[in-house]
Amino acid sequence: MPEKLKVGVVGLGIWGQNHPMVYDDYERAELAVVCDLDAEKAKSVAAKYGCEWTTDVRELAASDVSTFSVATPDHAHSAPTRTLLEAGKNVLVEKPLTTDLAQAKELTELAESSSGLSMVDFHLRWDPQWGLIKETVDAGGIGAPVMGYIRLSDAIEVAENWLGWAGKSGPHWFLYPHTMDMMCWVLGQRPKSVYARGHKGVLAAKGVDTWDCIQTMVEFETANVTFETSWIVPDANPSVLDCHMSLYGEAGKIDYDQDYSGISFVTDKYTYPWVPLGRKNRWGKLDHYMYQPMRYFVDCVLDGVTPEGTFRDGLENVAMIEAALRSLETGAPVAMDDLR
């Protein structure tokens, strides 16, 4: 029998419930406890997997469980992560690290001085398509990158119906962490300056006080990249997700249309189906790439390997988004060195 790592999960929302499912399925992990402020939800998930439950992160910090996922809403990552880091636990946090730059700096300092391992779940790094893009750029397949464009937006139903806390986040905190991490990772470069423009009004009229859409230009060492994000894509869009990327180099170009996989369904409407999340394939396995970071973190803890997707990466990610927000306020570019 392989060595099993006791793991706990904090936060059992739409995405958070994937974490206990993955740990319960993984042969190197033992799901020991789940935690949520909603006692009935915590109790229900615990009953499903046969583990303990609590509503108090302090109980987790005092337990013999060494490793935790934090998958609370975007704005609620800081407090449980701090409590667990201070207790010397290994902590995997969903992106974004926080929605506050000062908190992100504090957590990064804690993580780097902690005896435990830490990681931010930027799960697009495990998408084989993005992996191929990075390998191609690293190998010089398109020459030095000079210009890029990336869009990741959601249908309006995400803000309107999926997330009860949408007004405390926004497309910038919910989606920019993915695309900004991807371009930093693919380019292997740090951002130098950030300029952003955006719009509010559509979501506010529906009672969700956040940005409808934002466009951000980021200057890197060799390339300028335009980032676009929105929570007001019409629900009639074929996919809830709208993701496209173009990257130009001195000797070539890469295009990636992530929401269209090559399959379309036409019934009473026209849709691009997702590879299903939340269920096993016909061989009884959880095989979606989005589940790989949880397994990877368990492997890193058991094998004594420092994981990628560090809190330092997470801090840079938060700083880029904070720079965009400051630019939205001032109408001027923001130097990244002013935030580091």
Image: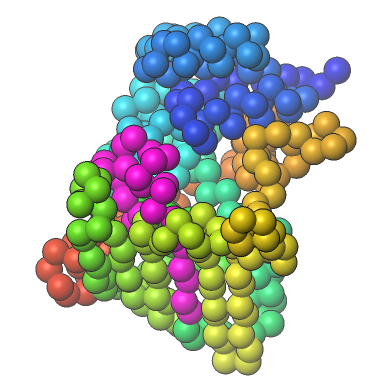
Q: Quadrant of the C terminus?
A: bottom left
Instruction: Residue 290: say if magenta.
Output: no
Residue at point 31% right, 27% down? 79
Instruction: Residue 151: say if magenta.
Output: yes
**Total numbered badges shown on the rendered structure:** 0
* Residue at far left of view: 330
Residue at point 45% right, 45% down? 95
Residue 138 seen: no
Quadrant in which residue 171 is drawn: bottom left
Left or right, residue 97 beside residue 212 = right
Residue 121 seen: yes
- Considering only vertical position in the picture, is 33 above or below 156? above
- Considering only vertical position in the picture, is 191 above or below 23? below
* Residue at far front of view: 268
* Residue at far bottom of view: 251
The magenta-colored residue range is 148-172
- Considering only vertical position in the picture, is 305 above or below 236? above
Q: Residue 303 appears at what percent x and percent y? A: 70, 33
